[in-house]
Image: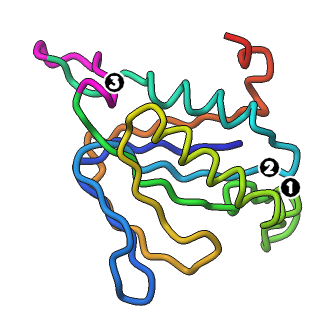
């Protein structure tokens, strides 16, 4: 799985001119699911994201987690994170999981976040969406479970 995590002061997602999800302070998570991903990838990412300390504490240092600031997550499924761009000018998305594999893992990711008492708003899987956000910092962190195979056990 690949996750692009952006610290935001607010964010929303719109489908067909209707806001379907929004948060105030927290993270926008753009989530790409690889064809070989499993629930272990979900668990690894949820742990890393919920424990990520990039919010300012009382001393102005990036030391607080999402829970400490009572923040939320706007979770957006984004298969284009698995674009292969080495050849030609048109990306290939063959590494991205097919919808029948990706959607249950995306839902499991969101549910696992909620089980950590994190408020989660979502986009609509497979829909054309407009995502608006106010990037705070900016702070953007990228996780890739394929690159972190040895760290999954920690």
Snapshot quadrant of residue 81: bottom right
Q: Which mark is residue 34?
A: 2
Horizontal relation, residue 97 to residue 46: left or right: right
Residue at mark 1 to residue at mark 3: CA–CA distance = 32 Å
Q: Position of residue 90 (x, y in %)?
A: 79, 73
Is 114 or 4 nearer to us in this picture?
114
Which residue is pictured at 72% across the width and 32% down the height?
A: 145
Q: CA distance from mark 2 to mark 1?
A: 6 Å
Would you place residue 135 above or below residue 124 in this image? above
The residue lying toward the viewer, choosing from 79 and 114, is 114
Give neighbour class at mark 2: few <14, some 14-19, many 20+ (Cα, 10 Å). Answer: many
- Asked if marks 3 and 2 touch (Cβ < 8 Å), the reply is no
Provide the residue designation for mark 1.
Answer: 95
Residue 27, image x, y percentages? 37, 44
Residue projecting furthest to the front: 115
Give the quadrant of the N terminus: top right
Q: Is residue 148 magenta?
A: no
Of the numbered discs 3 and 2, the one sitting upstream in the chain is 2
Q: Is residue 134 left or right of residue 50?
A: left
Residue at 70% of width from left, 61% of height from top? 103
**Mark found first going from the N terminus, 1 or 3:** 3
Question: Alpha carbon of mark 3 to alpha carbon of mark 2: how far?
Answer: 27 Å
Q: Position of residue 82 (x, y in %)?
A: 75, 55
Q: Residues within 10 Å of mark 1 (few under 14, many from 20)?
A: some
Residue occupying the point 62% across, 54% down: 107
Q: Which disc number belongs to residue 106? A: none
Mark 2 touches mark 1? (CB < 8 Å): yes
Task: Specify start and end residues of the magenta stretch as a single range.
Answer: 58-68
- The residue singled out by tag 3 in the image is 65
| Proximity of marks 1 and 3: CB atoms separated by less than 8 Å | no
């Amino acid at each position: 799985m690949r996750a692009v995590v952006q610290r935001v002061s607010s964010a929303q997602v719109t489908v067909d001119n209707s806001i379907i999800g929004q948060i105030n302070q927290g993270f926008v998570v753009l989530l790409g699911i690889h064809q070989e991903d499993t629930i272990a990838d979900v668990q690894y990412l949820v742990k890393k994201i919920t424990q990520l300390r990039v919010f300012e504490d009382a001393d102005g240092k990036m030391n607080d987690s999402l829970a400490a600031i009572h923040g939320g997550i706007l979770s957006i499924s984004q298969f284009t994170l698995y674009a292969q761009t080495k050849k030609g000018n048109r990306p290939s998305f063959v590494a991205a999981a097919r919808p029948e594999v990706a959607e249950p893992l995306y839902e499991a990711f969101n549910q696992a976040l909620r089980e950590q008492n994190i408020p989660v708003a979502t986009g609509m899987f497979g829909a054309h969406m407009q995502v608006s956000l106010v990037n705070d910092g900016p702070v953007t962190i990228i996780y890739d479970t394929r690159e972190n195979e040895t760290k999954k056990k920690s």
